[in-house]
Image (cartoon, helix red, strand yellow):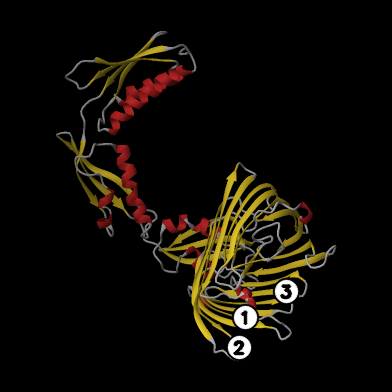
Amino acid sequence: MIKIYKYSCLFLLLTCSGSFIRAQKLELFVKPSQSESYSISSSKIFQDSARIFSELQSVLQADIENGYALAGYDSIIYDSVFVRAYYYRGDQYKWGQIRINSPDISKKLTGFLPDSLDRFDFISFFDKTSGMLKEYADNGYPFAGMKLDSVKITDNFVNAVVNIDPGEKYVFDSIIVKGESMIKTYYIRKIIEIEKDEMFSMSKINKLERQLKSISFIEQSRPYQLAFADGKTDIILYLRNKNASRFSGIIGILPNNKTTGKLLVTGDVNLYLLNSAGFGELFMFKWQKFESQSQNLKTEISVPYLFKSDFGAGVKFDIEKKDSSYLNTDFTGQILYGSNTGNGFELFFRRKSSYLLADSDLSSSEGFSGYSTNLYGLNYRFSNTDNIFNPVKGWVLLLSSGLGTKTTQAEETETPESVFQTRNSIDVSRFLPIGKYITIKLRNFTSSIYSVSVSDNELDLIGGLNTVRGFDELSLPASSFSVSNVELRYLFEEESALFAFFDAAYFEKRNTVNDSRNFVMGTGIGLDLNTGAGTFSMVFAIGKQNENPFDFTSTKIHFGYRNSF
């Protein structure tokens, strides 16, 4: 009967492109068993022969899935008006006793078998039992095979034995890196989470390419290979260096708020060196000047997987000088777990101190004071974007939380005072592709400082290219803020984009001498243009604060440059 069914379906398919063009009536005659006769089951009109074939196929498929293993079409008769299909359903079969004949891990496999009294269906049976071979492949047997044996049918119950041949057992051995990449093999092992002499696992192999893509400074020049011999598996990787280190500079031409009719030239220089020595190490240098006599300096050094362990170390040191008013220093020591640039987390100790300068006439009554804070906390990083510099899709998540004490430097008539302080922040970005060349970037950056008293010279500073465009860089002080960005980007090249944006932020000064709450918005357009010499950026932005209108005479123009190497 199965042969007749296959012949009939093939015949029907051939006629789909020929004579069956007009609407036809399908009459389905069903014979439930050998002892019964055919009787009409359904009568339907279809517009073409393709839909008739689909109907016949769905009837058969449904019965096979319900245990009617011998179902099929005895014959299909057609003319210009009718299609008459004679269908034999037969008896319904169910699974009886199924036994596994398998060494080593057979106790783990019973969950992959159909239950007794389940409807007999070979297709779903092999879909379900394929999990057995996956289990073997994840436990050192990548070449395991399976077959159904000793099949017996008793009273419409199918009894069988599943014989599994596990094949040779394998463990992971060497990781062989070929190509120009200078990355250490132990770094690769940490990222792909495969250790020497560990049991072979196909699930880990299936994740290998995705994990390699998370390393920003290398890429595959060709697909990886697996070499099996003597119970050991070598992973051969073909890697080349990828430009991940970068240098960037920004020049800003802004109206000088302190001198009417004058312009203020500002600067932002960044040097970011990654994997220069092959250990995955990071060195960062950042210098900023946004006001006359005021400068910021940020430095960072981190090395992951020290002594081939899961842990690394890092140090950050920042200096902020505010004209002749105060000098802030900020030191952070880190213990890293996981990558220092990709996914991972870190424990940190942070000491921040502020000193009022000798020629400053600031006092605590004006909201300024010398202080030092000691914070202990945790940072977490997650990213799955498709491009580190110009993402099209994916997420970026940065979490930070620290708590400790703040000690205010005493004036001559006062004693030092220590109070509780906590700093917390979350920075999340989502990149949503629209078609091939357009993506939408959604971002929210929220941060807060809590203490019974907060000095003006310990406030966070927002505004500018990285937060709210349309305002001077780091010109908006806040103890708490929430910044939202929406950006529509048209990527006409891999590293080039034309974009329009809208930024909004709520920020406040709380527990300070002069508490305040403000709302700002910024909007504009920009261009990132990649050339052989690097990527040049230009941004035009205007902003407004609270109920004030947009001031087009205070348009901010930012020029930038980034070179990857």
| Residue that lies at the very extreme toward the bottom in this rendered image | 412
Q: Nearer the viewer, residue 111 or 456?
A: 456
Residue 364 bears which disc, if any?
1
What's the residue at 71%, 79% (across, down)? 325
Tell me the residue at 76%/52% (across/down): 552
Q: Which numbered circle lies on residue 295?
A: 3
Q: Is residue 499 above or below residue 275?
A: above
What SS does tag 3 mark?
strand
Pinpoint residue 338: horizontal percent, then vertical percent: 50, 69
Could you say whether the residue bearing mark 1 is in a helix, strand or loop? helix
Residue under circle 2?
411
Residue closest to the far top = 80
Q: Position of residue 198 (x, y in %)?
A: 41, 67
Residue drawn at x 40%, y 24% as measured from the top left: 54
Q: Residue at x 73, y 67 (%)?
A: 268
Residue type at the position of mark 1:
Ser
Left of 145 or right of it: where is 37? left
**Residue nearest the viewer, comparing 14 with 80:** 80
As drawn, 26 above or below 308: above
Q: Is residue 199 left or right of residue 280?
A: left
Can you tell which mark lies on residue 535? none
Mark 2 neighbour density, 10 Å: few (under 14) some (14–19) many (20 or more): few
Give the residue type that dot 3 points to. Answer: Gln
For the residues labelled 1 and 2, say whether their Cβ atoms are less than 8 Å apart.
yes
| Viewer can see residue 87 | yes
* Earlier sequence position, callout 1 versus callout 2: 1
Q: Residues within 10 Å of mark 1 (few under 14, many from 20)?
A: few
Name the secondary structure under disc 2: loop
